[in-house]
Amino acid sequence: MPISLTVQKTEGKPGQVYYPLKLNEVPKPTPREGEVLIRLSAAALNHRDLFIRQHLYPAISFDRPMLADGCGVVVEVGPGCSSDGNSLLHKSVVLMPSAGWESDPEGPEGTFAVLGSSKLHPAGMAQEYVAFPESQVELAPEHLSFVETAALPLVGLTGWRAFVTKSGNAERGRNILVTGIGGGVALQVLQFAIAMGCNVYVTSGDEAKIERAKTLGAKGGVTYKNARWDKELLALLPGDRKYLDAVVDGAGGDIVARTAKILKQGGVISQYGMTLGPKMEWSMAAVLKNIELRGSTMGSHAEFVEMVKFVKEKKIKPVVSRVVYGLDNVDGINGLFEDMKAGKQFGKLVVDFGGDSGSKL
């Protein structure tokens, strides 16, 4: 029988508990009206999955498969699918990592849910087969392997909205600061911004990660462990544009205080996460410079389609940090979680399911 991977409930307080992984035998699903059946080939981890194991995320399901990111091959088309659905048969596809948000640029039209271990949506990518709405899959970029494709959905969508939709500065020649380089979203923003001709600068607590970002096209970077990193960053900016146009940030903390002096009048801080804590200070200095703080959470299906199209056109390859093989390789998958807990990764952590689906068709 096919298998799936879930988290197993154990006693413990949020933040102190660490739910173990559990392998399950499950029946092969049958696609319903408007669905296609996909044999999944690879899936990827996100910080959300670590938060789930620590019970630091809402609406956790212990019965539904883990992971939001996945890709695979359509092996069956259900009733009521369009002609496009039939054209997907035997094709490699990438799946929308969330549901409830179709196209409204302001926010979700319905109940928004991220896939994987969720009471709000039955699907998760840590399973060998998934029946999925035809309308929510896209043909995978042909230049990507299954592993690279699985690395794209959630971070690509989150980075696209935070940078392209929300920052308003996805234009050639703009100076963009991307914080926390090494994380999946930050790396996707880096790649998107470089492909659009921006000058990208990065921060990290690890000098080696800054150097790796430079090899990907970053103009420079600073370590946030240095008390004067904002002044160091200012010195790196080009002489004819000694200011930042936008900051794309996933950490929070003192980012407003650090960047208010070097953002242009009317500059933007696009915030897609706050890993340093759920609150941060807003300063009068930012008000006087007309700086805008814009929250950004994942994105819509319409933005997902735009993002995948851009990746295809620009031949962008998501950065993969490490791969383990086999959905049943619980020890290996636990090792990926250990990488994430320790902050070792530079790029995405991916599970290649192996077998006939483990390499690109």
Image (spheres, rainbow, N blue to C red):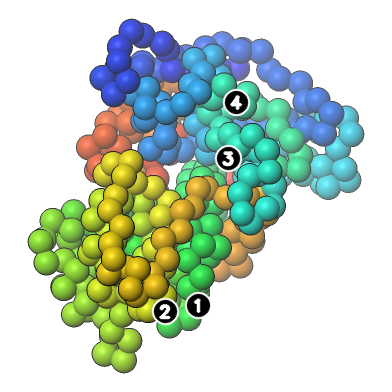
Q: Do the residues labelled 3 and 4 touch (CB within 8 Å)?
A: no
How crowded pointer 2 is (Cα within 10 Å; few <14, some 14-19, many 20+) is rated as some
> Which numbered mark, 3 or 4, is in the foreground of this view?
4
The mark nearer the N terminus, 4 or 1, is: 4
Q: Dot 3 corresponds to which residue? A: 97
Residue sitting at 23 percent across and 56 percent down? 254
What kind of element bears circle 1?
A: loop
The mark nearer the N terminus, 3 or 4, is: 3
How crowded pointer 3 is (Cα within 10 Å; few <14, some 14-19, many 20+) is rated as many
Q: Quadrant of the N terminus?
A: top right
Task: Give the residue type at disc 3.
Answer: Pro
> Which numbered mark, 1 or 3, is in the foreground of this view?
1
Distance between mark 3 and mark 4 Cα atoms:
13 Å
The mark nearer the N terminus, 3 or 2, is: 3
Q: Dot 4 corresponds to which residue? A: 120
Q: Do the residues labelled 3 and 2 touch (CB within 8 Å)?
A: no
Distance between mark 3 and mark 2 Cα atoms:
30 Å
Residue sitting at 42 percent across and 38 percent down? 46
Q: Dot 2 corresponds to which residue? A: 174
